[in-house]
DNA sequence: ATGTGGCACTCTCAGCGTCCGAGTGCCAAT
DNA sequence: ATTGGCACTCGGACGCTGAGAGTGCCACAT
């Protein structure tokens, strides 16, 4: 009983099942994929694969279905990612290049990915952590409020209203703004805290509380806003015909509404690897996602991704195709942002 | 055959059906609602109501179900909006008041409404049209790009990157920014175009093309951003048990993803009335929403609402409760924003 | 004119038994 | 190690039936 053929069988099962959405039996297996052996032989292999936990049968006398473990093996060792066709690539690039705006780029990316994969697409906004500060704006809003606007070099704009204990002296704001920009502009956001806190001393003692307050607000905003926003598209694909989760789609929708869940998920996946990562079924510890898989990839500089994009669908998904799409979109997205 | 009782019967049918989700027959009708007559009498009334198109039976020998027309009559004339309880009101107010930010207010509102109605909630961002300009910021981004940031008095921040034909002269930007703010700050956005265009003359002839370009960009941004953004919550409620649309939820999800559809819908409903408006089933011309109803209300100043919120669910929804919730949230939202 | 009881009629749906076919596991033979 | 053969299992489709819900109508009462 050759080990190689067993893996071939697993691959065939996965591919067939993904295609038909029905448990696959030994007969159709030898018919559709031309393995040069008889159904009986396949049956032996299948029994072995089942013992090893790669496949399972929903009930006696039905075909086999891959388990999470089976998909995992398939993804890790058996699938060949088929690159997108040249026209597809051109279309992607053209579509993304029409974007006028960071928001627009992100929006287009997520829609594009949803359409390419026929699944739910998720795009995380570029993290503020790696980017540099372009400009910092302070705008007095009423007597005791200060609007802090942070503009980064990749075009993201963050805002925050700051409530002050006491009114701001009029002349302080322009000075503070000027100094802040002088010390902070052009620096990477991670490198900011230290020079900022040193800056306090340059002010009169009476003004130091205010200055510190503002600086802390800036730091907070940066910290909070980091990896905070997510956009999503293609939720309707969850309900598309043939995509019946054995359960309902409700828990999935619930999980998707909790952006926190998604963010944590993406972050965890980022830790696993900077490239394309796949989480399959129960590998997601979130209960609602027990029957879904996520394919994610970082974008931004290759070595230091700035955020992630992902595609989410039933465990029974076209991994090869999804991986190809996710990778392609991530790549073009990186290229656009590099400008 | 009294006209009054016929309407009572219709009301009873709607209430029962909304409650049980099952076609309601003459017997249970007289049992549950104590109409003082016999089932046979009710049957005559039901026949009349059916002839008039207010109710229908899914198949012979099943109970009756309200039609869109029936719900419409119910909403317009038969339902009594039950105001929320005092604790509920307090909870709403407290929850919304914790918000730190315009984004936060909107986010909290939409989640709150989704939870109150157990449906999909939609909140439109405050229109820029009615609000005034607080501050206008120009930030050079690279050689030929200018980031325009518009801050309104209700805390909304809009941004736009402007691509220029030729490099900007360094000294122009501060001057332009100063003049822009001098002429525009504090004015209502609708009133801006005229003074802005007059402003051009104040600059040297050589700079006028740039100035005009920027001004046009500002105007465009305002025009585009107006009523553009929408947030949504509670899509998972579409899939909640007992809420089976006769069709699938897919078309609904698709409609919800098309923000344009929702925006147009809300705008149309705003034209109908500034207060609470209800669209029932096929009254929505969008095909995907043929089995859903939307309850919407404006918020902001009573006379001149600044945007709308809405709750969307199956036609078979608790109209009285939903209307009460939508109205309450709109009211508290208005109050918060008035500060 | 309006309400009521009675009654025949219709139709859905749940339950049940049957049967077919797909698929398996095992074994003896190659 | 592979294969053909064979008995076995089980789910799902099919068809039938009976119960129950609900209606429409009619004759009668008020």
Image (cartoon, coloured by chain):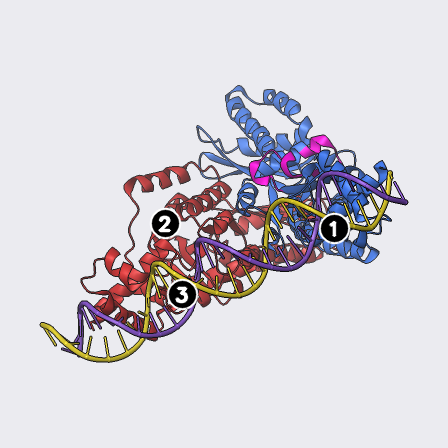
Chain colours: A blue, B red, C purple, D yellow
Residue B293: where, in percent of width, then height? 43, 60
Question: How far apart, in angstroms, are the residues tagged by discs 1 and 2?
Answer: 49 Å
Residue A161: where, in percent of width, then height? 51, 37
Disc number lying in front (1 or 2) = 1
Residue at numbered disc 1: A16
Looking at the image, which residue is at 59% across and 29% down?
A219
Disc number lying in front (2 or 3) = 2
Residue C12: where, in percent of width, then height? 43, 64
Q: Which of marks 2 and 3 is nearer the N terminus?
A: 3
Q: Is residue A15 inside the magenta stretch?
A: no
Residues under numbered marks 3 and 1 in contact, where contact means CB atoms less than 8 Å apart:
no
User: From which residue to which does the magenta span run?
Assistant: A269-291
Question: Is residue A329 among what the camera can see?
Answer: no
Same chain for labels 3 and 1? Say yes or no. Answer: no
At mark 1, the secondary structure is helix
* Nearer to the camera, D22 or A160: D22
Residue at numbered disc 2: B325
At mark 3, the secondary structure is helix
Residue at numbered disc 3: B272
Residue A275: where, in percent of width, then height? 76, 37
The residue marked by circle 1 belongs to what chain?
A
Looking at the image, which residue is at 84% across and 52% down?
A34
């Amino acid at each position: 009983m050759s080990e190689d053929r067993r893996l071939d069988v697993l691959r065939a099962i996965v591919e067939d099942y993904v295609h038909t959405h029905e448990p696959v039996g030994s007969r159709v297996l030898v018919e559709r994929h031309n393995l040069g052996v008889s159904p009986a032989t396949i049956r032996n292999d299948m029994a072995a694969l089942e013992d090893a936990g790669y496949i399972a049968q929903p009930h006696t006398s039905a075909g086999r279905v891959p388990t999470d473990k089976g998909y995992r093996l398939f993804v890790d060792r058996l699938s060949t990612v088929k690159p997108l066709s040249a026209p597809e690539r051109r279309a992607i690039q053209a579509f993304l290049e029409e974007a006028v705006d960071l928001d627009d780029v992100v929006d287009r990316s997520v829609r594009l990915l949803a359409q390419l994969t026929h699944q739910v697409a998720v795009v995380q906004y570029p993290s503020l952590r790696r980017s540099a500060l372009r400009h910092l704006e302070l705008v007095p809003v009423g007597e005791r409020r200060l609007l802090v606007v942070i503009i980064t070099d990749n075009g993201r704009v963050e805002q925050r209203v700051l409530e002050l204990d006491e009114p701001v002296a009029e002349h302080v704001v322009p000075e503070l703004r000027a100094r802040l920009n002088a010390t902070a502009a052009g620096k990477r956001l991670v490198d900011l805290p230290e020079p900022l806190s040193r800056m306090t001393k340059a002010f009169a003692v009476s003004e130091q509380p205010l200055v510190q307050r503002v600086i802390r607000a800036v730091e907070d905003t940066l910290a909070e806003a980091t990896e905070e926003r997510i956009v999503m598209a293609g939720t309707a694909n969850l309900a598309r015909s043939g995509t019946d989760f054995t359960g309902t789609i409700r828990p999935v929708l619930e999980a998707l509404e909790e952006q926190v869940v998604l963010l944590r998920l993406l972050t965890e996946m980022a830790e696993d690897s900077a490239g394309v990562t796949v989480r399959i079924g129960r590998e997601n510890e979130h209960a609602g996602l027990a029957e879904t898989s996520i394919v994610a990839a970082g974008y931004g500089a290759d070595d230091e991704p700035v955020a992630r994009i992902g595609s989410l669908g039933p465990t029974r998904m076209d991994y090869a195709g999804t991986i190809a799409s996710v990778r392609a979109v991530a790549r073009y997205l990186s290229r656009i942002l590099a400008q």
